[in-house]
Image: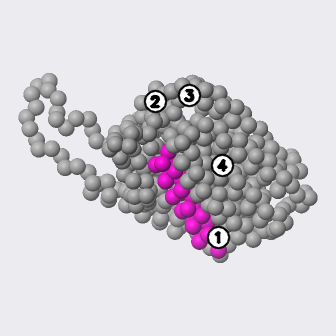
Amino acid sequence: MPFPVFWCFALLSNTAASAQWVNIAWALGDNRLPAAVLAVWQISALLGTIPGVLLGARAARRLGPVRTLVWSSAVEAASCLAVAVAAWDTGDGLSTRRALLVAVVCSVTPFAVGFGGPSWLALVGAWPGSASRTRQLLLDSIQFQLGRTAGPPVAALLIATVAHPVPVAAVANAVTFLAVTVIMLAAARTPGVGPPPPRPADAPTARPSWRLFGSTAVLAAAGYALASDTSRLYVARLIRAADLPAVVFSVTVSVVALTAAGAAAVAARRRIPDRRLAQLGLGLLATGLLTWATASTLGVPAWIVGGALVGASLPLAHAALTSLVMGEAGDADQATGAAVTMATNTGAVALGSTVVAPLVSPLGPLVFLPLAALAAIALARVRRRYRADAPAPPPAVPVPVGGVSAGGSPPGRPR
């Protein structure tokens, strides 16, 4: 299957998924509901994602990434229909009991995403004809962020015009996942699609998967996920607390996604080393969160400008850190590296949402300050570690005119 065809269907699916997410975030962010509902939402995502990732990595090794994605898309379509049933209300908004039910039922979707996520990243990163894993991940990030750009306006339209926006968005999302299931079934019959097969037992092995959790890239990814995803989780509630309309939230989310797509497109055209790309992304994230922290004073402009900075940070840090971890896992086990990154990110976000939830109401936008500090710490850790691990330059030797230096190509280029 040509990658552009795969890319376009993924864009359609992510647009519908984004519209569903915005509708759920707006419904669960109702100020009449306790803030703990959002924490339950994230805890449910953790309880769904971790088993999904672990099973997904194993399934990718046994079934292959394409067949694993067939099952993942089918389960996700079923989960969307379950959300549609759970989110049906009387038209006056969700009660606390119904909101908690929606938050728990939503755990099925993260399970399906976790189950197929490692295979998705492995499939995209090793697509036939691709020259760089990092570039492929950036291209995938473009369609993902474009979907998140188109999704919020659709969600805002549903909120303004439909009596039951969450069920409508969930049903539409289920239809797109059924289409992706059909596409994956067709791809399963195409030879040569997917990463290389596992190495023989006697071949040299890469770093054991359990040791990846202690690597600098994984720890930085955890800090990045905790700061970025936790902060975006509470944006809807803080905007509603400021008595701003839904359109402000919709525009903010769209700006985040649009700038993310633009940053990914620019980075994909340049050969920037992964370590520098990660540093740039973490720096932009810290700056964007500091800007959001001024929303009590600056109002709407702070949400928009901060959203642009946070959005630009997302694909850079995500692609670079994921590529570093997948590289440490080895070319023959890309799905395991992706699974380690996904599991770490999910655990970090669940922890962050639990800690931040009781601080949202008393602190307001100032709750973004400690998250910005966390992003800055992750940035400092990446800079210090990779600077310390940089190989010593070779001794200077005369190079004849027209000769080639023994140093070879510049270090740190994307693989």
Q: Is residue 338 magenta?
A: yes
How far across and how far down the image is residue 249, in percent? 70, 54
Quarter holding residue 64: top right
Of circles 3 and 1, which is in front?
A: 3
Please tell me which of labels 3 and 1 falls first in the chain: 3
Q: CA distance from mark 1 to mark 4?
A: 26 Å
Q: CA distance from mark 3 to mark 1?
A: 41 Å
Please tell me which of labels 1 and 2 falls first in the chain: 2
**Which residues are the magenta region?**
335-358
Q: CA distance from mark 2 to mark 3?
A: 10 Å
Q: Quick check: marks 4 and 2 in contact, CB under 8 Å? A: no
Please tell me whether mark 2 sits on a helix, a strand or a loop: loop
Q: Residue at x 50, y 63 (%)?
A: 372
- Please tell me which residue lies in front, 367 or 343: 343
Q: Quick check: marks 2 and 3 in contact, CB under 8 Å? A: yes
Q: Say few, some or many: other residues with alpha carbon within 10 Å of mark 4 (under 14 / 14 to 19 / 20 or more).
A: many
Q: Provide the residue designation for mark 1.
A: 357
Q: Which mark is residue 130?
A: 2
Q: CA distance from mark 1 to mark 2?
A: 42 Å
Q: Which mark is residue 3?
A: 3
Please tell me which of labels 1 and 4 falls first in the chain: 4
Quarter holding residue 405: top left
Q: Residue at x 43, y 58 (%)?
A: 210
Q: Which mark is residue 112?
A: 4
How far across and how far down the image is residue 340, in percent? 49, 53
How far across and how far down the image is residue 177, in percent? 71, 39
Q: Is residue 50 visible?
A: yes
